[in-house]
Every structure is written in C-alpha cells, then in structure tokens.
Image (cartoon, grey):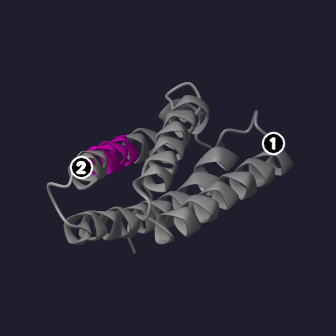
Amino acid sequence: MTKPLTASQALAELADQHAALRSMMERCDDLADELDNGHIGSTQLLREVARLRIAFDEHNKFEENLLHPLLLDVDWLGAVRVARMVEEHIAEHRSMRRHLGSTPSPTSELRAVIDSLRAHLDNEERYFLSQRVLRDDLAG
C-alpha cells in the first residue's frame, strides 16, 4: 500500500502540476495568436487544447482524491465546510472541462476558457493549496 502524501508533498506535486498546466495554456494562447494571424491551421491548436484537456483531467482526478482528506485533517475548517468547498471546487472543474471540450472555435472562446482556468488555479493556490491551509504540523 502506498503511504499517503504529507501536506507539503501534496503542495509540491500540485504546484508542479499547476506550472505544467500554465505552460500548456501559454502554448494554447500562442497558437491561437498564430491561427488568428493566419500563420497556422487549426490542427496544431486542436492538438494542444487536447493535451491541455487531458492534463487538466489528470490533475483534477489527483487533486479531487487528495484535497478532501487533506482538508479534513485541518480540523479548524470543519467537515461540513470542507465538503461544500470541495463540492463547489469540483463543479468548477466540470464546468471548465466542458468549456475546454467545446473549443477552439472561435479562439475568443478558447481565450475566455484559458483565462477562467488561470483564475481557477490562482484561487486554488490562494484558498486551498497554501502552506497556511495545508501544513504538515496540522495533520491529525
């Protein structure tokens, strides 16, 4: 059986995943610019959006399995509040996933989804994935 991750290990892994997602989002933005300028066809952008969607799905599965138990260890949050936070968070994941599946035509929609995803990652890091919330010394 695999030993559960500590809060600091989980934060490090999630930070790495967020960095990879941000890199893919930048690549999608760059390719959307190229498409808008008529320098490329849509195939490259479609491929990169597919890569982003897959990486986002994998990240969400990892995070959703990890986040609830880690937040429950932070006893000051309370089980009901944690359940609601995680439920709302997962709903955001599903909404962005649906939007990623409907892009990249037109690129303005793709850019809106990418902006939403960036804001989502920023909020995760601010409210869930910070050393103020998830600390090894708070784990029960």
Q: Amino acid at mark 2?
A: Arg
Q: In the image, is 6 to the left or to the right of 98?
A: left
Q: Quadrant of residue 127?
A: top right
- Residue 20 drawn at (x, y percent): 28, 49
Q: Residue at x 39, y 47 (%)?
A: 14
Q: Residue furthest top?
A: 132
Mark count: 2
- Residue 135 drawn at (x, y percent): 52, 32
Q: Residue at x 22, y 72 (%)?
A: 43
Asked if residue 13 lies in the magenta stretch, the reply is yes
Name the residue carrying label 1: 78
Quarter in which the C terminus is drawn? top right
Q: Earlier in the sequence, mark 2 or mark 1?
A: 2
Q: Amino acid at mark 1?
A: Gly
What residue span does the magenta drawing correspond to? 12-26
* Numbered badge on residue 27: 2
Residue 129 appears in the rendering: no
